[in-house]
Image (spheres, rainbow, N blue to C red):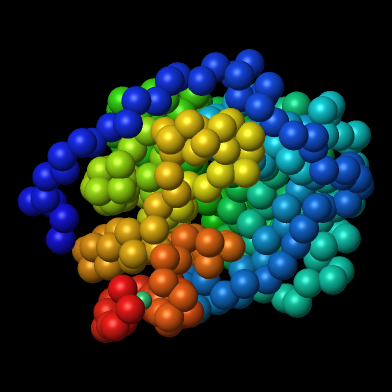
Amino acid sequence: MVSGETSAATHYSVAHATSHQIIKARAAKNTVDPWMPYHFHVEPEYSASGHVDDVATVFLTNRECPYKCLMCDLWKNTTDTSVPVGAVPAQIDFALKRLSPAPHIKLYNSGNFFDPGAIPVADWPAIADRVGSFRTVIVENHPKLCGADCVKFQTLLNDRAGSDTQLEVALGLETSHEATLATLNKNMTTRDFADACEFLLRHQIQIRAFVLLRPPGVSELDGIMQAIASVRFAFDCGVGCVAVIPTRAGNGIVDEMQQAGTFQPPSLRSLERVIDETVSWNRGRVFADLWEIEQFAGCRECAKQRIERLQQINLSQSILPAIDCCDC
Ligand code: SF4
Ligand SMILES: [Zn+2]
């Protein structure tokens, strides 16, 4: 438990970077093909029904997100202009032909599914045809873009006879700490997030949330405490599933902040503390984001065991015995 802990020197000063500064710090984008997804895979995930199910993820190539969040690196695999009508369905076809069958699918587009400049509205029927047989379709979206379009797409998914596909919208909460959230250039308050959740749930659309562990300007201990509070806030808003993502450099501006001493990546131990605390509540699923997680490990001796333990917690949603290590 960390709720009773206090931290001394809490916030490092962090300037509010503007969209212009964030863009200026970037390196070049990767070369992408509008007719090809930039990645796709199938991974197991502990499902809402309490089973470990396969989930297909198609990382769609499309126009860059209009928001410029401080920590975001998703722009790397995007186009500068909207992709042609027909390209997104073709990308889904390409991936589904190569992936093993799965009951759930994530259509992640490095931005907002309900941004018409990203996913052409004219493609929705073709997309629904391709994914309307999955039990769950999960798309990413900014809280401020959650409105009638989400309901329309949910209806399209279920227009097929006998289809009861559940739409789930993945929202970046990032943090419920209002002052930290304001530094992230996300153009959102916690009120916006709560309003989006209320709207989606009223229309029987499920929600997952992304929470950052230790964004720039936050100390290690405050990072833990803010992440735990953020998971609690997400559950209070009716979110069914939260992914906790250790903040990392790599997008330009966060690297600059790291060099200036206003950003330090969190440790693997901190991720364990957040997961141990929030999974124990049994309020909903909590996943540790384990992508390239080795970089956060401070001790070579136990890193593998700690990562394996987090993987097992992800897949069981049960707390496992802590790892003891003589070296750390
Ligand atoms: S809204 Fe999401 S995709 Fe867009 S810049 Fe922010 S984090 Fe990146
Ligand atoms: Zn160790």
Position in image of residue 211 (x %, y %): 41, 47
Residue at 68 percent across and 61 percent down: it is 57
Q: Is residue 142 above or below residue 248?
A: above
Instruction: Work out which residue is located at the far left of the displayed protein and give it.
Output: 4
Q: Give coordinates of residue 78: x percent, y percent.
A: 78, 38
Residue drawn 29% across the image and 83% down it: 326
Front one among 102 and 190: 190
Position of 324 compared to 143: left or right? left
Residue 148 seen in the figure:
no
On-image quarter of the C terminus: bottom left
- How far from the left and from the top, in percent, is residue 236? 26, 45
Name above or below for residue 162 compared with residue 77: below
| Vertical position of residue 184 compared to residue 214: above or below | above
Image quarter (top left, top right, bottom left or bottom right) of the N terminus: bottom left
Residue 26, visible in the rendered structure: yes
Left or right for 195, reference 321:
right
Ligand 2 placement by image quarter: bottom left
On the picture, is 114 further left or further right than 267?
A: right
- Name which quarter of the figure residue 79 lies in: top right
The residue lying at 72 percent from left, 67 percent from top is 41
The residue at the point 88 percent across, 51 percent down is: 36
Rendered location of residue 28, percent (x, y)? 80, 35
Front in this rendered view, residue 297 or 316: 297
